[in-house]
Structures are given as structure tokens and as C-alpha cells.
Amino acid sequence: MTEQARIFDEIVFQRRALRAFLPRPVPTDILERIFTVAQRAPSNCNTQPWLTHVASGASLQSLAEELPRRFMAGQITLDFPYDGVYQGVYKERQYGSAQALYDAVRIERSDKARRHEQFMRNFTFFDAPHVAFLFLPEPFGLREAADLGMYAQTLMLAMTAHGLGSCPQTALSFEADIIREHLGVAAVNKLLFGISFGYADPDSPVNDCLTDRAALADCVSFHA
């Protein structure tokens, strides 16, 4: 294995969803470098069909105050349907992931109140100092959403390489209208999800949460 391959493998294995961050903001030069690197992500015909808005400081604090209130009031506005149903092995993986999170923070699965409290932390971004909101401009759809997914993975790997933690959150897409309003984003840009990021809190037990991955043979077939 070359040194380059070893470093890449290490970065990929280090990246995972973290849910507790230090309040320390990321320096501007590092932010700009990370998002510059992410622009190298592949896309169909090099269309680069993503629009990213990064909220920090007072802008983010305003959202952290508004989003929980709106969600609890049932004021949900989705740009894309959230109607997927997991069955079979996919349901098992979802269950295992949730259980790993609850185990890390010592919440019994029967404790609905604390589970709800943990879920609501999505809307205060797990105290992260920055959130990247990822939008698809109209009329893009499924194929371009795949491009945005490749961009998001490239972005999170770049964050990991620079010593940052991240957490992709589909829950943030539940409040698309108010996020657009706060950030001054045109209605033609549709919110797919957000990524909270910053310096991970090393002392928070929630960051000890590790999820497993399916065996290679379960997902990949090689044909000669």
C-alpha cells in the first residue's frame, strides 16, 4: 500500500457522524480550503448541481432558536418527499444504528422522552458552530441529487482531513421554508439536507457511537 492510499483509507475510516461539537469556530482560511476541495466532486456532465449556504454565528443562532419551536408546532415544510419505508436488512441496519446511538448516551429504547430530547438536538445542530445547507436548484431531481450526494461525501472527507467532525442531517430538511427565509435563499433552490460541522467534543459520550457496515460480499459483486 502506498502512503497516499494509507492516508486516504485512514481519512475514510475516521469519518463518521458526530453529535457533539466544541463552540470554537473554524478559521476562515480552513473553511474556504475545505469547500474549494469539495468543488472537485464529480457530477453528470460537470453540471455541479449544488448550491451550499454555510450558516455561522448569529445567523445560526437565530435558526437554532426558531427551528425547534416550529417543529414542535408541527410547522414542517419539505421540498422533497420523506416517505421511504425500510424493510428487511435495511430496517435491521436502521435499528442497529439507532441502538448504537442510544447505547452511547445510555438511553433505554423504552425511554421515549429522552429519545425525543436526543432527536430534537438535530434542530440545534448538536451545538456545532457551522452548518452547511445543501440545495438543489429547480428543476433538478433524482440524478442531480446523486451528484449532490457525491459532493457531500467529498465535503465531509475534506472536513475529516482537516481535523473537523461532521454530521449529515436529513432532519434539517423538515424546515426548508424558514431556512431559506433566514439565509435569503431563493424559492427555486430546494433543500435536500444539512451538515453540521466543527471541532468534535472529545469528552462527549455521544461521539463514542460507532455503527457497523455490511460485509463486502453483501453489497459488492465482482464479475470477470
Image: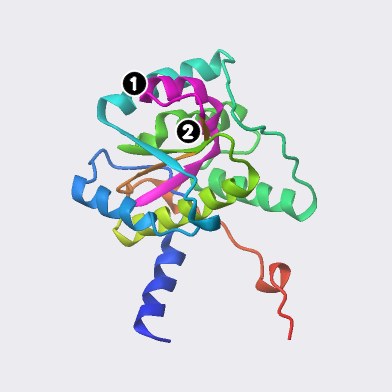
Q: Position of residue 199 (x, y in %)?
A: 29, 48
The residue sitting at the right extreme is: 88
Part of the protein shown in magenta: 164-188
Work out whether mark 2 precedes mark 1 in sequence or the reverse, and give the earlier one. 1
Q: Residue at x 19, y 50 (%)?
A: 29
Q: Residues within 10 Å of mark 2 (few under 14, many from 20)?
A: many
Q: Nearer the viewer, mark 2 or mark 1?
A: 1
State whether residue 108 is above or below residue 162.
above
Q: Is residue 21 a member of the stretch shown in magenta?
A: no
Q: Amino acid at mark 2?
A: Asn
Q: Which residue is mark 1?
A: 62
The relative height of residue 74 versus residue 131 in the rendered view (above or below) is above
Residue 167 falls inside the magenta stretch: yes
User: Mark 2 to mark 1: distance in Å?
Assistant: 15 Å
The disc at residue 122 is 2
- Residue at point 33%, 49% (across, down): 200
